[in-house]
Image: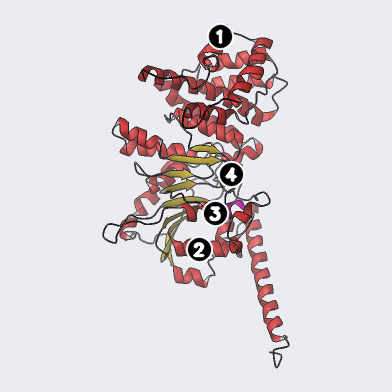
Amino acid sequence: MSISSVIKSIQDIMRKDAGVDGDAQRLGQMSWLLFLKIFDAQEEELEFELDDYQEPIPSEYLWRNWAADDEGITGDELLEFVNDKLFVDLKNLTAPINLNPRGYVVREAFSDAFNYMKNGTLLRQVINKLNEIDFTDSKERHLFGDLYEQILKDLQSAGNAGEFYTPRAITRFIVDRIDPQLGESIMDPACGTGGFLACAFDHVKEKYVKTAEDHQTLQKQIHGVEKKQLPHLLCTTNMLLHGIEVPVQVKHGNTLNKPLSSWDDEIDVIVTNPPFGGTEEDGIEKNFPADTRTRETADLFLQLIIEVLASPSGTDDNAKTGGRAAVVLPDGTLFGEGVKTKIKKLLTEECNLHTIVRLPNGVFNPYTGIKTNILFFTKGQPTKNVWFYEHPYPAGVKNYNKTKPMKFEEFQTEIQWWGSEEDGFASRVETEQAWQVSIDEIIARNFNLDIKNPHIEETVSHDPQELLADYAKQQADIQALRDQLKGILSNALSPESSEVK
Protein backbone atom coordinates (compact mmCIF):
# COMPACT_ATOMS: atom_id res chain seq x y z
CA MET A 1 0.00 0.00 0.00
CA SER A 2 1.35 3.48 -0.91
CA ILE A 3 2.00 6.09 1.77
CA SER A 4 -0.75 8.32 0.39
CA SER A 5 -3.18 5.38 0.67
CA VAL A 6 -2.11 4.84 4.29
CA ILE A 7 -2.82 8.50 5.10
CA LYS A 8 -6.19 8.36 3.37
CA SER A 9 -7.08 5.22 5.37
CA ILE A 10 -6.08 7.00 8.59
CA GLN A 11 -8.28 9.98 7.76
CA ASP A 12 -11.21 7.65 6.99
CA ILE A 13 -10.77 5.93 10.38
CA MET A 14 -10.65 9.28 12.18
CA ARG A 15 -13.90 10.39 10.55
CA LYS A 16 -15.63 7.62 12.51
CA ASP A 17 -14.43 9.02 15.84
CA ALA A 18 -16.81 11.39 17.65
CA GLY A 19 -13.94 13.41 19.13
CA VAL A 20 -12.34 14.46 15.85
CA ASP A 21 -14.10 17.35 14.15
CA GLY A 22 -12.83 18.55 10.78
CA ASP A 23 -9.58 18.50 8.81
CA ALA A 24 -7.62 20.66 11.25
CA GLN A 25 -8.21 18.26 14.17
CA ARG A 26 -7.49 15.22 12.00
CA LEU A 27 -4.18 16.80 11.02
CA GLY A 28 -3.43 17.71 14.62
CA GLN A 29 -4.12 14.14 15.74
CA MET A 30 -1.98 12.67 12.98
CA SER A 31 0.84 15.14 13.67
CA TRP A 32 1.67 14.11 17.23
CA LEU A 33 1.47 10.42 16.29
CA LEU A 34 3.82 10.97 13.33
CA PHE A 35 6.15 12.98 15.54
CA LEU A 36 6.51 10.15 18.09
CA LYS A 37 6.97 7.50 15.39
CA ILE A 38 9.64 9.50 13.53
CA PHE A 39 11.32 10.51 16.81
CA ASP A 40 11.62 6.84 17.80
CA ALA A 41 13.00 5.88 14.39
CA GLN A 42 15.72 8.49 14.88
CA GLU A 43 16.29 7.22 18.43
CA GLU A 44 17.03 3.74 17.10
CA GLU A 45 19.65 5.18 14.75
CA LEU A 46 21.30 7.21 17.52
CA GLU A 47 21.36 4.22 19.87
CA PHE A 48 23.13 2.20 17.18
CA GLU A 49 25.68 4.95 16.44
CA LEU A 50 26.53 6.06 20.02
CA ASP A 51 27.88 3.73 22.71
CA ASP A 52 26.85 5.81 25.72
CA TYR A 53 23.53 7.08 24.39
CA GLN A 54 20.85 7.88 26.98
CA GLU A 55 17.14 7.97 26.16
CA PRO A 56 15.76 11.53 26.33
CA ILE A 57 12.24 10.48 27.41
CA PRO A 58 10.99 7.62 29.61
CA SER A 59 11.34 4.32 27.76
CA GLU A 60 7.65 3.46 28.09
CA TYR A 61 6.74 6.44 25.84
CA LEU A 62 8.96 5.43 22.94
CA TRP A 63 6.79 4.32 20.03
CA ARG A 64 8.29 0.81 19.95
CA ASN A 65 7.20 0.14 23.55
CA TRP A 66 3.52 1.10 23.39
CA ALA A 67 2.45 1.42 19.76
CA ALA A 68 4.60 -0.78 17.50
CA ASP A 69 2.86 -4.08 18.37
CA ASP A 70 -0.32 -4.29 16.31
CA GLU A 71 -1.76 -6.60 18.98
CA GLY A 72 -0.83 -4.20 21.80
CA ILE A 73 -3.07 -2.24 24.16
CA THR A 74 -6.30 -0.95 22.68
CA GLY A 75 -9.73 0.37 23.67
CA ASP A 76 -10.13 2.11 27.03
CA GLU A 77 -6.73 0.89 28.22
CA LEU A 78 -5.03 2.65 25.31
CA LEU A 79 -7.01 5.86 25.84
CA GLU A 80 -6.12 5.92 29.55
CA PHE A 81 -2.45 5.39 28.76
CA VAL A 82 -2.39 8.18 26.16
CA ASN A 83 -4.51 10.73 28.03
CA ASP A 84 -3.48 10.11 31.64
CA LYS A 85 0.15 9.10 31.27
CA LEU A 86 1.81 9.83 27.92
CA PHE A 87 0.43 13.33 27.42
CA VAL A 88 0.69 14.33 31.07
CA ASP A 89 4.29 13.17 31.46
CA LEU A 90 5.57 14.49 28.12
CA LYS A 91 3.98 17.91 28.67
CA ASN A 92 5.65 18.08 32.10
CA LEU A 93 8.93 16.41 31.18
CA THR A 94 11.95 17.71 33.09
CA ALA A 95 14.32 18.35 30.22
CA PRO A 96 16.68 21.35 30.43
CA ILE A 97 17.73 22.42 26.96
CA ASN A 98 21.44 22.25 27.86
CA LEU A 99 21.28 18.83 29.54
CA ASN A 100 18.59 17.00 27.55
CA PRO A 101 17.96 18.90 24.30
CA ARG A 102 16.04 16.08 22.58
CA GLY A 103 13.80 15.74 25.61
CA TYR A 104 13.30 19.51 25.47
CA VAL A 105 12.19 19.18 21.83
CA VAL A 106 9.59 16.55 22.82
CA ARG A 107 8.22 18.68 25.65
CA GLU A 108 7.92 21.71 23.38
CA ALA A 109 6.23 19.62 20.67
CA PHE A 110 3.61 18.41 23.17
CA SER A 111 3.13 21.73 24.98
CA ASP A 112 -0.10 22.51 23.09
CA ALA A 113 -0.83 19.15 21.45
CA PHE A 114 -4.06 17.22 22.15
CA ASN A 115 -5.45 13.74 21.71
CA TYR A 116 -8.80 14.37 20.07
CA MET A 117 -9.83 10.74 19.60
CA LYS A 118 -12.35 9.30 22.06
CA ASN A 119 -12.50 5.74 20.77
CA GLY A 120 -9.48 3.66 21.80
CA THR A 121 -10.24 0.93 19.27
CA LEU A 122 -10.20 3.44 16.40
CA LEU A 123 -7.01 4.97 17.80
CA ARG A 124 -5.38 1.53 17.70
CA GLN A 125 -6.48 1.17 14.06
CA VAL A 126 -4.83 4.51 13.24
CA ILE A 127 -1.61 3.48 15.01
CA ASN A 128 -1.56 0.15 13.16
CA LYS A 129 -1.88 1.98 9.85
CA LEU A 130 1.09 4.17 10.76
CA ASN A 131 3.05 1.02 11.57
CA GLU A 132 2.86 0.14 7.87
CA ILE A 133 5.40 2.94 7.26
CA ASP A 134 9.01 2.15 8.22
CA PHE A 135 10.83 5.42 8.84
CA THR A 136 14.13 3.60 9.40
CA ASP A 137 14.01 2.51 5.76
CA SER A 138 15.69 5.13 3.57
CA LYS A 139 13.34 4.51 0.64
CA GLU A 140 10.20 4.88 2.74
CA ARG A 141 11.64 7.92 4.50
CA HIS A 142 12.24 9.46 1.10
CA LEU A 143 8.64 8.67 0.12
CA PHE A 144 7.50 10.53 3.22
CA GLY A 145 8.11 13.67 1.20
CA ASP A 146 5.03 12.73 -0.83
CA LEU A 147 3.06 12.15 2.37
CA TYR A 148 4.19 15.49 3.73
CA GLU A 149 3.12 17.23 0.55
CA GLN A 150 -0.32 15.65 0.96
CA ILE A 151 -0.53 16.86 4.56
CA LEU A 152 0.37 20.38 3.44
CA LYS A 153 -2.25 20.31 0.71
CA ASP A 154 -4.79 19.22 3.32
CA LEU A 155 -3.62 22.09 5.51
CA GLN A 156 -4.10 24.44 2.60
CA SER A 157 -7.77 23.51 2.33
CA ALA A 158 -8.40 23.35 6.08
CA GLY A 159 -9.56 26.92 6.51
CA ASN A 160 -7.13 29.25 8.25
CA ALA A 161 -4.48 26.53 8.44
CA GLY A 162 -3.78 27.16 4.75
CA GLU A 163 -1.62 30.15 5.63
CA PHE A 164 1.23 27.78 6.52
CA TYR A 165 1.68 26.44 3.00
CA THR A 166 4.04 27.91 0.41
CA PRO A 167 4.21 26.08 -2.92
CA ARG A 168 7.39 24.02 -3.19
CA ALA A 169 8.25 25.62 -6.55
CA ILE A 170 8.60 29.01 -4.84
CA THR A 171 10.62 27.73 -1.88
CA ARG A 172 13.01 25.92 -4.26
CA PHE A 173 13.43 28.96 -6.51
CA ILE A 174 14.08 31.30 -3.58
CA VAL A 175 16.61 28.99 -1.92
CA ASP A 176 18.31 28.30 -5.26
CA ARG A 177 18.81 32.04 -5.87
CA ILE A 178 19.84 32.91 -2.29
CA ASP A 179 22.25 29.93 -2.25
CA PRO A 180 22.87 29.53 1.53
CA GLN A 181 26.37 28.29 2.33
CA LEU A 182 27.73 25.87 4.93
CA GLY A 183 28.17 27.70 8.23
CA GLU A 184 25.76 30.54 7.49
CA SER A 185 22.86 31.06 9.88
CA ILE A 186 19.57 30.46 8.06
CA MET A 187 16.29 31.75 9.49
CA ASP A 188 12.58 31.79 8.73
CA PRO A 189 10.91 34.04 11.33
CA ALA A 190 7.44 32.75 10.37
CA CYS A 191 8.39 29.19 9.46
CA GLY A 192 5.00 27.45 9.37
CA THR A 193 5.57 23.77 8.66
CA GLY A 194 9.22 24.36 7.74
CA GLY A 195 9.12 24.36 3.94
CA PHE A 196 11.82 27.01 3.54
CA LEU A 197 14.00 25.54 6.30
CA ALA A 198 13.79 22.00 4.89
CA CYS A 199 14.58 23.26 1.39
CA ALA A 200 17.56 25.30 2.65
CA PHE A 201 18.81 22.31 4.66
CA ASP A 202 18.65 20.05 1.59
CA HIS A 203 20.34 22.69 -0.58
CA VAL A 204 23.34 23.07 1.74
CA LYS A 205 23.56 19.31 2.33
CA GLU A 206 23.59 18.48 -1.38
CA LYS A 207 26.01 21.23 -2.44
CA TYR A 208 28.39 21.82 0.47
CA VAL A 209 28.34 19.01 3.08
CA LYS A 210 31.32 16.68 2.61
CA THR A 211 32.05 15.26 6.08
CA ALA A 212 30.31 14.23 9.32
CA GLU A 213 31.59 17.47 10.86
CA ASP A 214 29.98 19.44 8.04
CA HIS A 215 26.66 17.72 8.77
CA GLN A 216 26.88 18.70 12.45
CA THR A 217 27.60 22.29 11.40
CA LEU A 218 24.58 22.28 9.09
CA GLN A 219 22.24 21.05 11.84
CA LYS A 220 23.12 24.13 13.93
CA GLN A 221 22.53 26.58 11.06
CA ILE A 222 18.74 26.22 10.89
CA HIS A 223 16.59 28.66 12.90
CA GLY A 224 12.82 29.13 12.81
CA VAL A 225 9.93 30.46 14.86
CA GLU A 226 6.27 29.53 14.46
CA LYS A 227 3.39 31.10 16.37
CA LYS A 228 0.78 28.33 16.08
CA GLN A 229 0.98 24.86 17.59
CA LEU A 230 -0.01 22.62 14.68
CA PRO A 231 2.43 23.98 12.09
CA HIS A 232 5.16 24.15 14.77
CA LEU A 233 4.71 20.46 15.52
CA LEU A 234 4.75 19.63 11.82
CA CYS A 235 7.86 21.76 11.36
CA THR A 236 9.67 20.00 14.21
CA THR A 237 8.72 16.62 12.71
CA ASN A 238 9.89 17.83 9.31
CA MET A 239 13.29 18.82 10.76
CA LEU A 240 13.68 15.43 12.48
CA LEU A 241 12.88 13.69 9.22
CA HIS A 242 15.53 15.71 7.39
CA GLY A 243 18.17 14.56 9.85
CA ILE A 244 18.31 17.37 12.40
CA GLU A 245 18.74 15.41 15.62
CA VAL A 246 18.01 18.32 17.97
CA PRO A 247 15.84 20.96 16.26
CA VAL A 248 15.81 23.22 19.34
CA GLN A 249 16.32 26.25 17.11
CA VAL A 250 12.77 25.79 15.79
CA LYS A 251 10.85 27.62 18.48
CA HIS A 252 7.16 27.90 19.31
CA GLY A 253 6.33 31.58 19.75
CA ASN A 254 5.73 34.93 18.07
CA THR A 255 8.88 36.42 16.55
CA LEU A 256 7.32 39.89 16.76
CA ASN A 257 6.73 39.63 20.52
CA LYS A 258 10.08 41.23 21.34
CA PRO A 259 11.24 44.88 21.09
CA LEU A 260 13.06 45.45 17.82
CA SER A 261 15.79 47.35 19.66
CA SER A 262 16.57 44.30 21.82
CA TRP A 263 17.47 42.04 18.87
CA ASP A 264 21.21 41.47 18.81
CA ASP A 265 21.08 38.45 16.48
CA GLU A 266 22.89 38.74 13.16
CA ILE A 267 21.42 36.38 10.58
CA ASP A 268 23.19 35.60 7.31
CA VAL A 269 20.20 34.32 5.33
CA ILE A 270 16.46 34.89 5.77
CA VAL A 271 13.96 33.14 3.50
CA THR A 272 10.31 33.54 4.39
CA ASN A 273 6.69 34.01 3.39
CA PRO A 274 5.35 35.97 6.38
CA PRO A 275 1.60 36.08 7.01
CA PHE A 276 -0.08 38.95 5.17
CA GLY A 277 -3.54 40.39 5.13
CA GLY A 278 -3.86 40.03 8.91
CA THR A 279 -3.20 42.14 11.97
CA GLU A 280 -1.29 41.47 15.15
CA GLU A 281 -2.72 41.51 18.66
CA ASP A 282 -2.84 44.78 20.60
CA GLY A 283 0.50 45.89 21.96
CA ILE A 284 2.77 44.08 19.47
CA GLU A 285 3.26 47.31 17.49
CA LYS A 286 4.85 48.94 20.57
CA ASN A 287 7.89 46.72 19.98
CA PHE A 288 8.68 48.84 16.90
CA PRO A 289 9.82 52.45 16.35
CA ALA A 290 7.06 55.03 16.82
CA ASP A 291 7.17 56.30 13.23
CA THR A 292 6.78 52.83 11.70
CA ARG A 293 4.27 51.30 14.07
CA THR A 294 1.46 49.29 12.52
CA ARG A 295 -0.54 46.18 13.36
CA GLU A 296 -0.23 44.75 9.85
CA THR A 297 1.81 41.57 10.18
CA ALA A 298 3.74 41.68 6.89
CA ASP A 299 4.93 45.26 7.54
CA LEU A 300 6.23 44.31 10.99
CA PHE A 301 8.07 41.26 9.65
CA LEU A 302 9.74 43.32 6.92
CA GLN A 303 11.08 45.75 9.55
CA LEU A 304 12.30 42.85 11.67
CA ILE A 305 14.10 41.23 8.72
CA ILE A 306 15.92 44.47 7.85
CA GLU A 307 17.01 44.79 11.49
CA VAL A 308 18.31 41.26 12.10
CA LEU A 309 20.12 40.70 8.80
CA ALA A 310 23.87 40.67 9.38
CA SER A 311 25.71 43.89 8.54
CA PRO A 312 28.82 43.78 6.31
CA SER A 313 32.04 43.06 8.19
CA GLY A 314 35.76 43.19 7.52
CA THR A 315 38.00 45.67 5.75
CA ASP A 316 37.39 47.13 2.30
CA ASP A 317 39.91 44.70 0.83
CA ASN A 318 38.47 41.70 2.62
CA ALA A 319 34.89 42.67 3.35
CA LYS A 320 32.13 40.18 3.97
CA THR A 321 28.84 41.09 2.33
CA GLY A 322 25.84 41.69 4.54
CA GLY A 323 23.04 39.26 5.17
CA ARG A 324 20.69 38.51 2.30
CA ALA A 325 16.99 37.84 2.22
CA ALA A 326 14.14 36.78 -0.02
CA VAL A 327 10.64 37.62 1.20
CA VAL A 328 7.21 36.91 -0.32
CA LEU A 329 4.99 40.00 0.00
CA PRO A 330 1.63 41.08 -1.45
CA ASP A 331 1.07 43.86 -3.97
CA GLY A 332 -0.31 46.00 -1.14
CA THR A 333 3.18 46.34 0.29
CA LEU A 334 4.49 47.60 -3.04
CA PHE A 335 1.95 50.38 -3.60
CA GLY A 336 0.93 51.09 0.01
CA GLU A 337 1.57 54.51 1.53
CA GLY A 338 1.95 55.95 5.02
CA VAL A 339 3.89 53.57 7.23
CA LYS A 340 4.52 51.31 4.24
CA THR A 341 6.31 54.18 2.47
CA LYS A 342 8.58 54.72 5.47
CA ILE A 343 9.42 51.00 5.64
CA LYS A 344 10.23 50.88 1.91
CA LYS A 345 12.42 53.98 2.31
CA LEU A 346 14.23 52.22 5.17
CA LEU A 347 14.60 49.08 3.06
CA THR A 348 16.17 50.90 0.10
CA GLU A 349 18.48 52.96 2.33
CA GLU A 350 19.82 50.08 4.41
CA CYS A 351 19.70 47.30 1.80
CA ASN A 352 20.30 46.74 -1.87
CA LEU A 353 16.83 45.79 -3.09
CA HIS A 354 18.22 44.37 -6.32
CA THR A 355 15.34 42.23 -7.61
CA ILE A 356 11.56 42.00 -7.40
CA VAL A 357 9.99 38.95 -9.04
CA ARG A 358 6.33 39.67 -9.74
CA LEU A 359 4.29 36.47 -9.49
CA PRO A 360 1.07 35.93 -11.43
CA ASN A 361 -2.39 35.40 -9.95
CA GLY A 362 -3.32 32.06 -8.44
CA VAL A 363 0.05 31.02 -7.01
CA PHE A 364 -1.54 30.61 -3.57
CA ASN A 365 -4.94 29.32 -4.73
CA PRO A 366 -7.25 28.34 -3.17
CA TYR A 367 -6.05 30.06 0.00
CA THR A 368 -5.86 33.52 -1.56
CA GLY A 369 -5.98 35.11 -5.00
CA ILE A 370 -3.94 38.14 -3.88
CA LYS A 371 -1.05 38.90 -6.23
CA THR A 372 2.34 38.40 -4.63
CA ASN A 373 5.98 39.29 -5.21
CA ILE A 374 9.37 38.01 -4.10
CA LEU A 375 11.72 40.75 -2.87
CA PHE A 376 15.44 39.90 -2.93
CA PHE A 377 17.77 42.21 -0.99
CA THR A 378 21.19 42.34 0.67
CA LYS A 379 22.00 44.46 3.72
CA GLY A 380 24.82 46.98 3.81
CA GLN A 381 24.59 49.06 0.63
CA PRO A 382 21.77 51.40 -0.41
CA THR A 383 19.71 50.57 -3.47
CA LYS A 384 20.77 52.19 -6.75
CA ASN A 385 18.59 50.27 -9.20
CA VAL A 386 15.83 47.69 -8.86
CA TRP A 387 15.36 44.98 -11.45
CA PHE A 388 11.79 43.75 -11.95
CA TYR A 389 10.98 40.38 -13.47
CA GLU A 390 7.38 39.52 -14.31
CA HIS A 391 6.96 35.77 -14.08
CA PRO A 392 4.58 34.65 -16.86
CA TYR A 393 2.19 31.75 -16.88
CA PRO A 394 3.57 28.76 -18.80
CA ALA A 395 2.16 28.18 -22.27
CA GLY A 396 -1.45 27.03 -22.19
CA VAL A 397 -2.01 27.98 -18.52
CA LYS A 398 -4.37 30.81 -17.56
CA ASN A 399 -4.35 30.23 -13.82
CA TYR A 400 -2.95 27.85 -11.20
CA ASN A 401 -5.07 25.46 -9.18
CA LYS A 402 -4.79 22.21 -7.20
CA THR A 403 -4.45 20.06 -10.28
CA LYS A 404 -2.15 22.50 -12.11
CA PRO A 405 0.16 24.04 -9.49
CA MET A 406 3.21 26.16 -10.22
CA LYS A 407 6.32 24.11 -11.08
CA PHE A 408 9.97 24.84 -10.33
CA GLU A 409 10.90 24.32 -13.98
CA GLU A 410 9.00 27.50 -14.83
CA PHE A 411 11.75 29.52 -13.14
CA GLN A 412 14.54 28.32 -15.45
CA THR A 413 14.27 31.48 -17.54
CA GLU A 414 14.80 33.65 -14.45
CA ILE A 415 17.70 31.47 -13.32
CA GLN A 416 19.44 31.78 -16.70
CA TRP A 417 18.88 35.56 -16.70
CA TRP A 418 19.86 36.12 -13.05
CA GLY A 419 23.60 36.79 -13.14
CA SER A 420 25.74 37.53 -10.08
CA GLU A 421 25.41 40.12 -7.33
CA GLU A 422 29.21 40.22 -7.04
CA ASP A 423 29.48 42.15 -10.33
CA GLY A 424 26.28 44.10 -9.77
CA PHE A 425 24.29 41.80 -12.07
CA ALA A 426 26.21 43.24 -15.03
CA SER A 427 25.03 40.43 -17.31
CA ARG A 428 21.34 41.25 -16.94
CA VAL A 429 19.50 42.67 -19.93
CA GLU A 430 15.99 43.98 -20.40
CA THR A 431 13.56 41.51 -21.94
CA GLU A 432 9.80 41.31 -22.38
CA GLN A 433 9.69 40.12 -18.76
CA ALA A 434 12.56 42.12 -17.22
CA TRP A 435 13.11 45.86 -16.74
CA GLN A 436 15.20 48.14 -14.52
CA VAL A 437 14.14 51.19 -12.49
CA SER A 438 16.53 53.67 -10.83
CA ILE A 439 16.24 54.63 -7.18
CA ASP A 440 15.72 58.26 -8.29
CA GLU A 441 12.57 57.26 -10.14
CA ILE A 442 11.40 55.20 -7.16
CA ILE A 443 11.94 58.19 -4.84
CA ALA A 444 10.00 60.39 -7.29
CA ARG A 445 7.18 57.85 -7.10
CA ASN A 446 7.19 58.19 -3.28
CA PHE A 447 8.55 54.63 -3.03
CA ASN A 448 5.63 53.12 -4.90
CA LEU A 449 7.14 49.86 -6.16
CA ASP A 450 4.02 48.73 -8.01
CA ILE A 451 5.69 49.39 -11.36
CA LYS A 452 4.03 47.84 -14.39
CA ASN A 453 5.93 46.03 -17.10
CA PRO A 454 6.71 48.70 -19.72
CA HIS A 455 7.04 46.06 -22.45
CA ILE A 456 3.45 44.83 -22.18
CA GLU A 457 0.41 46.86 -23.12
CA GLU A 458 -1.97 47.43 -20.22
CA THR A 459 -4.96 45.12 -20.33
CA VAL A 460 -8.30 45.38 -18.60
CA SER A 461 -8.53 42.84 -15.78
CA HIS A 462 -11.78 41.36 -14.54
CA ASP A 463 -10.16 39.46 -11.68
CA PRO A 464 -12.01 40.36 -8.42
CA GLN A 465 -8.85 40.40 -6.33
CA GLU A 466 -7.08 42.71 -8.79
CA LEU A 467 -10.10 45.00 -8.95
CA LEU A 468 -10.24 45.20 -5.15
CA ALA A 469 -6.52 45.94 -4.98
CA ASP A 470 -6.87 48.68 -7.61
CA TYR A 471 -9.81 50.14 -5.71
CA ALA A 472 -7.81 50.19 -2.46
CA LYS A 473 -4.94 51.89 -4.26
CA GLN A 474 -7.28 54.52 -5.76
CA GLN A 475 -8.81 55.22 -2.35
CA ALA A 476 -5.33 55.63 -0.83
CA ASP A 477 -4.38 58.07 -3.61
CA ILE A 478 -7.59 60.06 -3.11
CA GLN A 479 -7.03 60.25 0.65
CA ALA A 480 -3.44 61.43 0.10
CA LEU A 481 -4.69 64.22 -2.22
CA ARG A 482 -7.33 65.22 0.33
CA ASP A 483 -4.73 65.42 3.09
CA GLN A 484 -2.45 67.46 0.84
CA LEU A 485 -5.30 69.85 -0.05
CA LYS A 486 -6.25 70.24 3.63
CA GLY A 487 -2.65 71.12 4.43
CA ILE A 488 -2.54 73.76 1.66
CA LEU A 489 -5.85 75.32 2.74
CA SER A 490 -4.85 75.25 6.40
CA ASN A 491 -1.63 77.13 5.67
CA ALA A 492 -3.35 79.59 3.37
CA LEU A 493 -6.06 80.47 5.90
CA SER A 494 -3.89 80.51 9.01
CA PRO A 495 -3.78 83.79 11.09
CA GLU A 496 -0.07 84.15 10.29
CA SER A 497 -0.85 84.45 6.60
CA SER A 498 -1.19 88.07 5.40
CA GLU A 499 -3.46 87.06 2.53
CA VAL A 500 -5.43 84.16 1.19
CA LYS A 501 -3.24 82.39 -1.34
Q: Earlier in the sequence, mark 1 or mark 3?
A: 1
In front: label 1 or label 3: 3
* Mark 3: secondary structure: helix
Residue 309 image position (x, y, % from top left): 44, 53
**Does the segment drawn in magenta span residue 299?**
yes
Q: Please, is residue 434 above or below residue 246 in the view?
A: below
Nearer-N-terminus badge (2/1): 1
The label nearer to you, 4 versus 2, is 4
Tell me where residue 333 appears, x and y as whole percent.
57, 58
Q: Nearer the viewer, residue 496 or 375?
A: 496
Task: Say the numbered circle drawn on residue 356.
Answer: none
Question: On residue 346, which mark appears?
Answer: 2
| CA separation in Å, label 2 and label 3 | 14 Å
Residue labelled with disc 4: 254
Residue at x 68%, y 73% (from the top left corner)? 483
- Give the amino acid at mark 3: Leu
Q: Which residues are magenta?
A: 296-302
Q: Give the distance between the C-alpha atoms of the residues marked 1 and 3, in whole angstroms.
A: 52 Å
Residue 110 image point, x, y percent: 59, 28
Q: Nearer the viewer, mark 4 or mark 3?
A: 3
Q: CA distance from mark 1 to mark 4?
A: 40 Å
134 above or below 190?
above
Say what amino acid the circle numbered 1 marks.
Asp
The first of marks 1 and 4 along the sequence is 1
Q: Separation of disc 4 and disc 2 at Cα?
A: 23 Å
**Which residue is tagged 1?**
70
* Badge 4 density bin: few <14, some 14–19, many ≥20, Cα 10 Å: some
